[in-house]
Amino acid sequence: MRPDILNPLFAETDTLDGVGPKLAKPLAKLGLTRIRDVIYHLPERFVTRRAVQNLDAASPGEQIVVALTVTEHRASNGRGPYRVMATDTLGNVCALTYFGRASYSAKKLLPVGETRWVAGRLDQYGQMLQIVHPDHVVEGSGDTLQRLCEPVYSLAEGLTQPKVASLVQQSLERLPELPEWIETSQLDGAGWPGWADALALAHKSDHETARDRLAYDELLANSLALLLVRAEGRKRAGQPLRGDGQLRAKLELPFPLTGAQKRSNEEIAGDMAQESPMLRLLQGDVGAGKTVVALEAMLVAVESGAQAALLAPTEILARQHFETLQAMLRPVGVEIARLTGRDKGRAREGILMGLLDGSIDIIVGTHAIFQDSVNYRNLGLVVIDEQHRFGVSQRLMLAAKGRRAPHTLAMTATPIPRTLTLAQYGEMDVSRLDELPPGRQPIDTRVVPQDRLAEVVDGVARHVAGGQQAYWVCPMVRENEFVTEDIAAAEARYASLRERFGDDVVLVHGQLTPELKDAGMQRFASGQAKLLVATTVIEVGVDVPAATLMVIEQAERFGLAQLHQLRGRVGRGAEKSVCLLLRGDALSETGKRRLALMRESQDGFRLAEEDLELRGGGELLGIRQSGDTPFRTATLEQIQRLLPVAHADARLLMEHGDGLEGARGEAARVLLYLFERDWGVKTLRGG
């Protein structure tokens, strides 16, 4: 149960003054449904203003507070702005400019002949000084002069800055007194304020130590929860699986294993031989041979008399894994089956019986393989493909499926920088496949300006005429009013390419139904369609060895990790492959560097680290794109700087805290509930 001390923070926002049904909607849009959410809705930036005696003392572009006397109101004809003319103490003229409905409030706020204190940004429009949409207009200077440093919050339609500031202020007044969960030496050494002070300071100014303290809280909560899950897993009785190597010896692989594959096989086999269940992440670059490593692990389970299950995120990937594994297992004599949500009737019954009586050794499928109706004779190993799509809570759910906890091997083809691996998978051991199999040809990567589009289409035509296949990736599905005209929408591109290629071209994007998407992918995978026009839905998994050309339109709009993933869809067969990055005219420095790195390097781990540097506080690689980053308060820079310290502190607390007993242990429990890392708390509930 959540500690009572936190109840005030988990009260609904409609308990705050001024929040009715009308405000509830925009607040919910921002995820601000409880007091706790409001206090952690930190300002995006701060506006710092200077109080000036007159306009001569200020420069255009500066944020100021100044006393002005209103001389006249000028309404414009048609849709032009509404201007209120005013003068300072020296007689300098300044226009207070309003657009749209804001002009109604201007009439009330600024009566002719009266003096008002005005806060806003001073600009020059032709020869005239103006302040567009002043932030504040008040009769006395006191209130405005107190706001010389003011927070700017992210908003949703229906909310204003003063409204959010007022809700934050009310919420801060309700803060309970919580016990301190940070080690005293860490707190003093970093010069951090207490929790409540840190929150108040972070809303008042760009207070770095306060922000760091709040980020550290979140990172500590996350690390603790992951370590608790790990400790709990180790306590659970698993089954040691020690294969005799007989089945693995029968595998006929087309190429020798790389050093990284051999090392990973040994690490995994070592884990599976232990009584405590394995929790291991297999990180492999595109084409590094994760499937072979996973297959060897599954054969260890089968050699030991247990069953193995491979979970894929989509039906098409499940089908592809099944076909690949089936071909590799032919000489071995192991029974493998596939189960997805589409399997019905007798076929499904047969598979369920085979899993229950043990005649099926390996099952490949989507989430269907973990439904309540699916039971195993002895499930010993679960392999999860495309790990970043599954959060910790799903990992726990899968672990509960066997009679004894099965070993878990998670695979991801998104190389993740080491810092973020710790953030996402702190409860897992990590194996990295950082070598490519021999015989893999490097992909020829070129950057082409968008204005050479016609030549690129001709090149695609020659490529297809030669019997090969190609991908064409677009950044957006449909043009809409929020997107500039120059974005090549996938539907428009498909229509134009269809005029040239007819039925040889197929379209796949995320807004199609799963059936249509699968059918399109299947036409391409089987070779019926020669050109696949798609959005980034193809970045994961799909394996079409005959596809040797990848065109990525407006490549500068994608992150490095995503570009690398997309490029990895080609270069899967023996033929030489090419990746063309089409770029727009307006290239930022970051965009240039990104495209240059793509030309230089095919090492996904290096690109992931570089991506982290380039993006700064932006998106976390493919992780935030898939909605699974665990952090709301900590920025990317703070994660890199503070996470190793928080992780070490959490480990210390676990080792000396006797399962979070004692005063600091109790405080740490409060922290876990505060940040809703309840999957970590659940493992404590017995204790």
Image (spheres, helix red, strand yellow):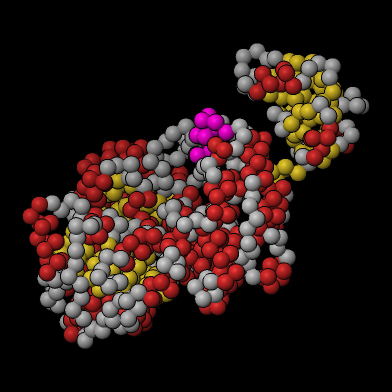
Tell which of 675 and 263 is nearer to you: 675
User: Who's the residue at 59% across and 42% down the image?
Assistant: 154
Work out whether residue 334 can be spotted: yes
Number of numbered discs visible in the structure rendering = 0
Extreme residue in the left direction: 346
Tell whether position 551 is magenta: no
Extreme residue in the bottom direction: 244
User: Who's the residue at 51% across and 67% down the image?
Assistant: 224
Describe residue 129's horizontal placement relative to residue 348 as left or right: right
Tell which of 481 and 598 is nearer to you: 481
Placement of 641 over or under 509, stated as above or below: below
Extreme residue in the top direction: 77
Describe residue 507's horizontal placement relative to residue 336 as left or right: right
User: Who's the residue at 30% across and 53% down the image?
Assistant: 470
- Residue 501: where, in percent of width, then height? 25, 43
Work out whether residue 381 can be spotted: no
- Residue 519: where, in percent of width, then height? 21, 47
Extreme residue in the front direction: 4
User: Who's the residue at 75% across and 25% down the image?
Assistant: 96
- Residue 542: where, in percent of width, then height? 29, 58
Placement of 597 over or under 99, stated as above or below: below
User: Which SS does the magenta portion mostly show?
Assistant: helix
Tell whether position 20 is magenta: yes
Quarter residue 652 falls in: bottom right
Write the start and end of the magenta stretch as one range. Answer: 19-28
